[in-house]
Amino acid sequence: MERKHPLPPFTQETALQKVQLAEDAWNSRDPERVAQGYTVDTEWRNRSEFINGRADVIKFLTGKWQRELDYKLKKELWAFTDNRIAVRFEYECHNAKGEWFRAYGNENWEFDENGLMKRRYASINDVPIKENERRL
């Protein structure tokens, strides 16, 4: 049985750990590594896209990081309950034309008993920035 510690129910400490682990995985820009934190039948809403299952997660993230170059992410714990965590985040990246963006958003996460994320719902907004305005 796959397990991804820390496991729910979350405390302040373990929720903070879970958020940091997710941030580290996403900043690796390795779709396979990121996908290992999700259930095989994970359900996502990312902006207007609906993604189901690890294979779709890997496909989605592979395309994302081919378009969003020099991606850097920061996540912040917003709230938590037994098996749910809410985060706010921002990330910066540029496209092939060298145009920079900062994305702001919120995510709601739900975990199974093995600490794998079974649901991820993300609302995200992009803001064009100049390279010298980068913070991350």
Image (cartoon, helix red, strand yellow):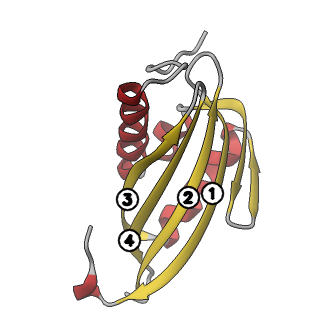
Look at the numbered discs 2 and 1 and tell me whether their residues touch, using CB distance below 8 Å.
yes
Disc 4 versus disc 1: distance between alpha carbons?
16 Å
- Quarter holding the C terminus is bottom left
Give the secondary structure at mark 2.
strand
Q: Position of residue 7 (x, y in %)?
A: 50, 18
Q: Amino acid at mark 2?
A: Asn
Q: Amino acid at mark 4?
A: Glu
Disc 3 versus disc 1: distance between alpha carbons?
14 Å
Dot placed on the residue nearer the N-terminal end, 2 or 3 = 3
The numbered dot on residue 92 is: 4
Q: Amino acid at mark 3?
A: Leu
Residue 45 lies left or right of residue 62; in this view the side is right
Q: Is residue 99 visible?
A: no
Dot placed on the residue nearer the N-terminal end, 4 or 3 = 3
Q: Residues within 10 Å of mark 2 (few under 14, many from 20)?
A: some
Look at the numbered discs 2 and 4 and tell me whether their residues touch, using CB distance below 8 Å.
no
Residue labelled with disc 3:
73
The numbered dot on residue 106 is: 2
Residue drawn where x is 52% and y is 78% of the image = 126
Q: Position of residue 100 (x, y in %)?
A: 38, 83
Outermost residue, top direction?
1
Residue labelled with disc 1:
122
Q: Nearer the viewer, residue 95 or 103?
A: 103
Disc 2 versus disc 3: distance between alpha carbons?
13 Å
